[in-house]
């Protein structure tokens, strides 16, 4: 992190980070006049600093796009941008279970000494910590802006749903559209069980199989048989995830932003959802305007 912390990758990275920054600034301008404590929560805060060695030793499917410069740059910039936003957040929570990356994140206290006492680095699994936080925090007195920037497919649906149940969190989600999910959807539907389990966990349902695949009766010289074929594209995958978000959140942006690499291949889908039913109109207006710029 120390060497790459100020590298935001290519032009698309700076552009997308600027969109996030604009929402953070609008959010704090509104909240600092209200009687709430409001936190910025960066789940998987160290995910942008994973190495090829980390991947080789994990059980993750091979997602090479995670190591492209543009991807690394995007993931590296969010925490620093949040700390630089004024008016400031009441609290900053960076979640990262790797000990070495926690030490690197701690250096942010030196860069932002005026906020050092309010920077909390949580060395835990993000899914476990966020679910616990959602249950234990007093959401009548607190608000939160959560950035889910997962490594691969680390965000579990139950975590997403727990944030929705707070009725107090705004959530930006980097959904791993092309960098991970589409890669697991094989053309013939012969998907390994562990891949199916990962897709079930990220979508919170197994219904994706019926949406993304079509089974047809085929007759040829060998006789009649059933064949299953992939019948989806990036737009349909993203649309399915947005509909899943709508099933639990008070409001979801209708125009999520595809994030493409330099070769114009989709990596992520930048999505926005708000759990607060009382601020849904304002939140969605700001988020959709920023996503549409």
Image (tube, grey):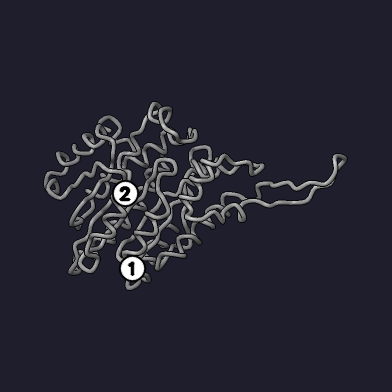
Spatial CA distance of label 2 from label 1 is 22 Å
Q: Quarter of the image holding residue 39?
A: bottom left
- In this view, 276 is above or below 259: below
- According to the picture, the residue beneath numbered tag 1 turns out to be 276
- In this view, 71 is above or below 248: above
- In this view, 233 is above or below 136: above
x%, y% of residue 203? 48, 53
- At numbered mark 1, what does the secondary structure look like: helix, strand or loop? loop
- In this view, 110 is above or below 164: above
x%, y% of residue 63? 48, 35
Q: Residue at x 18, y 37 (%)?
A: 107
Question: What quarter of the picture does the N terminus occupy?
Answer: top left
Density class for disc 1 (Cα within 10 Å; few <14, some 14-19, many ≥20) is many
x%, y% of residue 84? 22, 49
- According to the picture, the residue beneath numbered tag 2 turns out to be 128
Q: Residue at x 19, y 38 (%)?
A: 106
Q: Nearer the viewer, residue 281 or 231?
A: 231
x%, y% of residue 212? 61, 52
Q: Earlier in the sequence, mark 2 or mark 1?
A: 2
Q: Nearer the viewer, residue 52 or 211?
A: 211
- At numbered mark 2, what does the secondary structure look like: helix, strand or loop? helix
Question: What quarter of the picture does the C terminus occupy?
Answer: bottom left
The label on residue 236 is none
């Amino acid at each position: 992190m120390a060497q790459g912390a100020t590298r935001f990758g290519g032009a698309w990275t700076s552009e997308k980070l600027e969109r996030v920054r604009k929402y953070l600034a609008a959010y704090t301008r509104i909240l600092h006049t209200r009687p709430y404590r409001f936190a910025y929560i960066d789940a998987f805060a160290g995910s942008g600093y994973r190495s090829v060695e980390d991947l080789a030793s994990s059980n993750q499917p091979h997602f090479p796009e995670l190591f492209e410069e543009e991807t690394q740059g995007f993931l590296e910039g969010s925490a620093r941008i949040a700390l630089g936003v004024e008016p400031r957040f009441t609290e900053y929570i960076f979640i990262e279970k790797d000990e070495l990356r926690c030490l690197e994140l701690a250096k942010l206290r030196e860069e932002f000494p005026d906020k050092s006492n309010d920077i909390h680095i949580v060395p835990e699994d993000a899914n476990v910590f966020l679910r616990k936080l959602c249950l234990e925090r007093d959401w009548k007195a607190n608000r939160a802006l959560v950035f889910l920037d997962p490594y691969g497919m680390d965000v579990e649906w139950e975590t997403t749903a727990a944030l929705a149940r707070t009725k107090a969190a705004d959530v930006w989600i980097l959904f791993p559209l092309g960098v991970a999910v589409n890669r697991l959807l094989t053309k013939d539907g012969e998907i390994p069980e562990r891949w199916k389990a990962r897709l079930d966990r990220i979508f919170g349902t197994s219904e994706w199989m019926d949406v993304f695949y079509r089974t047809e009766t085929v007759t040829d010289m060998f006789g009649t048989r059933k064949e299953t074929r992939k019948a989806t594209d990036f737009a349909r995958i993203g649309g399915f995830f947005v509909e899943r978000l709508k099933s639990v959140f008070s409001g979801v942006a209708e125009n999520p932003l595809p994030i493409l690499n330099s070769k114009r291949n989709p990596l992520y889908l930048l999505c926005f959802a708000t759990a607060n039913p009382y601020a849904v109109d304002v939140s969605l207006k700001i988020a959709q305007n920023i996503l549409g710029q």
